[in-house]
Image: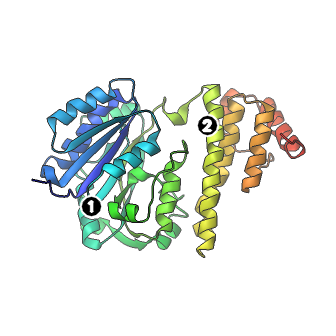
Amino acid sequence: MERAVPELSVVMPACNVGEFLDFAITNVVDHQFAAIDADRWELIIVDDGSTDSTLAVAERRRQLNPDSIRVVHTENRGVSAARNLGLKMARGEFVYFIDSDDILLQNSLMPLCLEAARRNADIVKFTFREIDTPAYLSMQANVPPANLTAEDFHDSSAADFICQTNGLAGPPLHHNVWSTIYRRRFLTDNRILFNPALTIGEDLIQTWHTMLANPRVLYTDRALYLYHQRSNSAMHVTDPARLTAIGQAYADYLAELLDVERRLAAAGQSSPRVLGGPELMFKIGYNRALCSMILGGASLARIFRTMRRLRALGGDVHPGRPRFERAIRRNIGRRYKLRRWITAYILAPLCHL
């Protein structure tokens, strides 16, 4: 007999996270669905070409919950492709994307789905807080319950939610997919996917495309997600070649963000508070792009090309008061830093590279 359609599909991309994955699965299976019938939920683990124990851990846990856990192994194509595949496989009325090294408060997902169904919402937004590795390890022994009630939720239109969160950029940032539950049909009907070409900012672009589709929003100010800031994560790399590549990836992401801004303007949503999100993210993004290249030791010629590209996208690259990241302030002397930045700024318009 064919299984009933589950209420919620949880999609978990996983790439070389063998040391975290077992607890991540426990956090979903035992902390979210222990008292819920197996046919009401499913967990889809997409192993994105892992070379460590990730696939073995996933398969072992699947054997313990064969009716509710599915595992698929693919070649390494990035988190966007993994999420897209998980969405394609999902059968639930709602879908949720969780990272494989973070923590959800106990009993948070199903109450979110039930309230969304009751209020006919297309997406549910909640907030998060960051934890470091020591806090993550200690939290494993005692994950607190969410204890959600109907009074915790608020209804909103997409436009109002964007304004209330200052263009999704108000603290805490509201563009993360792991702080959002989606009605699956809303994503598929509007053909909203993650851009596999992006390695940075893919979740922000997807969130803006979701908002441009004008969903009915249900949100809570409760911090239900604990984001694990790992020192060896992609956001904390120090390898020069990788940093330079990150700088180029930011330029690709900024092109998508400018397209979002154009779509917002075309839709008539020209309020400065609405456009403030993409504008702010663009300013942060081009600064990080150049910082990554400088810190990575990229050649001046490559910095010139990046600055020209950012200008073409609409970036006002100016060296007067550069907001460099801490890593650059720590690792590059002030004089060298300013000389390199100002040289690039002055010469970039004159170069035809």
On screen, residue 132 versus residue 332, left or right, reads left
Mark drawn on residue 338: none
Residue drawn at (51%, 34%) of the image:
234
Foreground: 169 or 123?
123
Q: State the image coordinates of residue 116 (x, y, percent, origin top left).
A: 29, 66
User: Can you name the residue that lies furthest to the bottom here?
Assistant: 268
Residue underneath mark 1: 93
On screen, residue 141 versus residue 328, left or right, reads left
Residue drawn at (22%, 58%) of the image:
7
Q: State the image coordinates of residue 243 (x, y, percent, origin top left).
A: 63, 32
Residue underneath mark 2: 246
Q: Secondary structure at mark 2?
A: helix
What colouring does the structure picture have?
rainbow
Q: Secondary structure at mark 1?
A: loop
Which image quadrant for residue 149? bottom left
Judge whether 142 appears above or below 171 on screen: above
User: Can you name the residue that lies furthest to the front here?
Assistant: 1
User: Can you name the residue that lies furthest to the left here?
Assistant: 1
The amino acid type of the residue labelled 2 equals Ile
Judge whether 107 appears above or below 216 on screen: above
